[in-house]
Image (tube, rainbow, N blue to C red):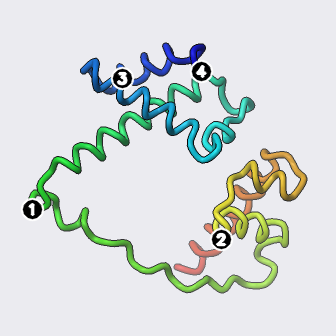
Amino acid sequence: MRRYAGLIVAAVRGVAHDAAEIEDLVQEVFVRLCKDGFRLLKTYDPGRAGLSTWLTIVARSTARDTLRRRQLALTPIDAVPEALLATDPPPPDKLRLPDGLLSPRQKLVLSMLYDRDMEVAEVATALGVDPQTVRSTHHKAMIKLRTHFATEER
């Protein structure tokens, strides 16, 4: 915490300007990094970015999200456009995919990521593969699905 506090303060300072607000936002960043058994912190992948880069992005995103939530909380309900208050439609029934479109591994990875809401690192650990393999398998499956449904629409 001591090592990266200055970096997080600098990142938050780019989003907020009031000293008290900056202090609150920095605390919110650290709470987010530590909550749920450090779940967010465990998603850090040194192969994708340096720790300082990753922390800067997390800090800015957390600060912006927190400020948006506060702004919405201060806005009278009558001033909020009705479209923002609408609930999401119910999820559609599961899609029926043609046999052989996706490999068994691709189906498994998509199921773990979307049906079970697992993180890439969790899927990689469960399958005993590298996280990059999970990302690659996911990417290839999504390309197949996009191609299939784009062709089906025509």
Q: Residue beneath label 3, please?
A: 23
Residue type of the residue flagged with mark 2:
Asp
**Comparing labels 3 and 4, the label whose residue is closer to the camera:** 3
What secondary structure is marked by label 4? helix
Is the residue 98 above or below the residue 133 in the image?
below
The numbered mark, 2 or 3, whose residue comes first in the sequence reads 3
Residue count near mark 1 (Cα–Cα under 10 Å), binned few <14, some 14–19, many ≥20: few
Q: Residue at x 25, y 62 (%)?
A: 84
Secondary structure at badge 3 equals: helix
Separation (CA) of disc 1 from disc 4: 41 Å
- Mark 3 and mark 4: span between their CA atoms? 19 Å
Q: Which residue is mark 4?
A: 52
Q: Are discs 4 and 2 less than 8 Å apart at CB?
A: no
Q: Earlier in the sequence, mark 3 or mark 4?
A: 3
Residue 31: give x, y in percent of width and height.
50, 36
Give residue 34's position: percent from left, percent from top: 58, 37
Q: Which mark is residue 78?
A: 1
Q: Amino acid at mark 4?
A: Ser
Amino acid type of disc 1?
Asp
Where is residue 19? Give x, y as percent.
28, 18
Mark 2 vs mark 3, foreground winner is 3
Residue position marked by numbered label 2 in the rendering = 115
Figure quadrant of residue 10: top left
SS at circle 1: helix
Q: Residue at x 17, y 47 (%)?
A: 74
Give the image location of residue 71, x and y in percent.
Answer: 22, 44
Q: Are marks 1 and 4 in contact (CB under 8 Å)?
A: no
